[in-house]
Image (spheres, grey):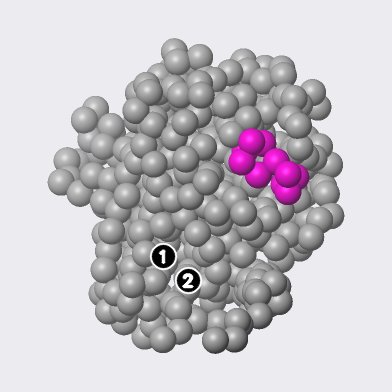
Amino acid sequence: MAKRRSYISGVGLNAAGGGSARAVFDRILTGFTLDAHRGSDLPADWDRSRVTQLAMAAAREAISETGWTPGVLEDERTGLFVGSSKGPIEDWIAQIEGRMPLSPMVGVGAVAMDVGRELNMHGPRLTLASACASGLQALIRADAMIRTGQIDRALVIGAESSLHPLFQACFARLGVLSKRGACRPFDTHRDGFLMSEAAAAVCVEARSDGPGLFIDGSAMVSDAHHITGIDPAGISLRYLLKKLNPHIPVDLVHAHGTATDSNDPVELAAIDDTFGPSAPAIYSHKAALGHTQGAAGMIGVVLNVLMHRQQIVLPNPHTTSPLPSAHLTIPVNPLPRLIRRSITLAAGFGGAIAGVAISEASNEMNRQSQAHKLDPPPQSL
């Protein structure tokens, strides 16, 4: 029986850098970065929550690229998976403050309910809320249900809109926000990140073979070291990276890369020790797009898909004095590179860490062919 895999057939993105995946990619390619906390330029729609509005914009782009018809979306074997750290939290706050009428539909799951209703989807519907790992965990769950035959396709969204002064103040008290107006992932002069809002969407569907990008592996772990800080030894992260099959060469790692004192050295050392000999390029989109919490991991996947398609690694323009690494490349400028396999990482408060690998199908076929050549000849009895 052929092995079912989750092929990526469409992507969408709406963020501070632009209103579509390609627009954002092209702006980052030319050096775009944030210099302040910032939202998307998507015009406000007061009839629905901001996070749902962002989610719908990204979802419609991904659906348009994949060519799914309304009938496909309505199929009960099409699932909807949403990852969000806080859901429509700004509506919740507005209701508490009396600026909006009270409504019971303000929980994290409201985004999936609103998107599912607007797209008339009738299949499984699930919300994952694991801080900044939420989006990747949603994709991992969708992939698992496709591989086990529970569904045939899925729309996966990571969405976040929590720029309220309350959250900015909370992150400021934790000392993780940049005071210089520039996020410098993996740089010796890093001083934290800037906050932003975004939504990223991916359409995945079951296939057994053929050209294209598919999910080549995934893993989730929990780091119980501290409620907001990563284990300095990176034990859980290193375990997760090993679950992503480091024996297969990796060309690109889209790191969590928050430019904080505690995260970056631990993450870089874990990647270096695990994948170092294959010398993957390291990229973090936080300098360009800010930190979007629950949407961050899915942004990483969407940008990785585009880097695969264009065979180029996006620049890390503020990483001019990189942390020491034995093997890794942290490009300051766009880097043309053969990208056959990539990994996206995301880590969140509470210890949730997730990773997703994607591969070119042709790369998988080449690996199988090479493995077949290296098999010893059968022994005579």
Marks 2/1 in contact by CB < 8 Å: the verdict is yes
Q: Is residue 199 visible?
A: no
Indicate left or right for 117 with 195 as reference.
Answer: left
Range drawn in magenta: 271-280
Residue shown at the point (47%, 71%) measured from the top left: 6
Determine the main secondary structure of the stretch shown in magenta: helix
Image spot of residue 291 (x, y percent): 54, 35
In front: 130, or 92? 130
In front: 286, or 272? 272
Q: Amino acid at mark 1?
A: Asp
Residue shown at the point (71%, 36%) measured from the top left: 33
Image spot of residue 192 (x, y percent): 59, 22
How packed mark 1 is, by other alpha carbons closer than 10 Å (few <14, some 14-19, many 20 or more), is many
Note whether 309 is above or below 253 in the view shown.
Answer: below
Image spot of residue 65 (x, y percent): 57, 74
Residue shown at the point (54%, 63%) measured from the top left: 216
Which label number is shown at residue 86? none
Instruction: Name the secondary structure under disc 2.
Output: strand
Gap between marks 2 and 1 measured at Cα: 6 Å
Which label number is shown at residue 143? 1
- Quarter of the image holding residue 329? top right
Which label number is shown at residue 6? 2
Indicate left or right for 217 with 361 as reference.
Answer: left
Q: Amino acid at mark 2?
A: Ser
